[in-house]
Amino acid sequence: MCLLDEVVEWSADSIRCRSESHRREDNALRAHGRLGIACGVEYAAQAMAVHGALRAASLSLEFHAGLLASVRGLSMHADRLDDIAGALFASATLVSGDSTMVLYGFSLADSNRVLLSGRATIAFAVALGEPPAMRASL
């Protein structure tokens, strides 16, 4: 499932992605005819994954799949996403990390306001003893 439509900008420390998928009736995260605000965490997580892949490629490193280990300090400033008229922008900023896990600050916004924000820890599957056949590489 890919929720993001494009990478607007990225650097070694951050990424900003655009999406229009929140209004699609076939959005895989929809439940009971709506797309709740908590689904915004998945939009941000996908931006973090894209950032990790781009960063690994730019540094000629092997990319490893990550698992969302925790979300902290989550603030939600809307009830749902499917009633947002314009594009959504998922942003993530790398705070710290190493080869076993990283910490990102993230937000999901429309053109006027932040809809959701928080921090997420991503643990890399290779650090968790994942079998080599399951590892993703560029």
Image: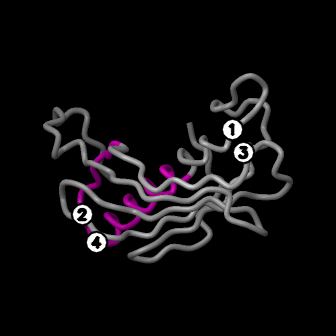
Q: Is 47 on the left or on the right of 63, as rendered?
A: right
> x, y (%) of residue 19?
69, 54
Query: Residue 6: x and y, percent?
Result: 63, 60
User: Which label is found at residue 59?
Assistant: 4
Position of residue 14 measured from the top left corner of the image (x, y, whole percent): 46, 72
Front residue of this view, candidates 108 and 64:
108
Q: Which mark lies nearer to you, 3 or 2? A: 3
Q: Secondary structure at mark 1?
A: loop
Residues under numbered marks 4 and 2 in contact, where contact means CB atoms less than 8 Å apart: yes
* Span of residues in magenta: 44-67
Q: CA distance from mark 4 to mark 2?
A: 5 Å
Q: Residue 61 — which label?
A: 2
Q: Is residue 11 above or below residue 74?
A: below
> Is 114 covered by the magenta stretch?
no
The relative height of residue 63 versus residue 69 in the rendered view (above or below) is: below
Front position among marks 3 and 4: 3
Camera-nearest residue between 35 and 13: 35
Residue 3 located left or right of residue 60: right
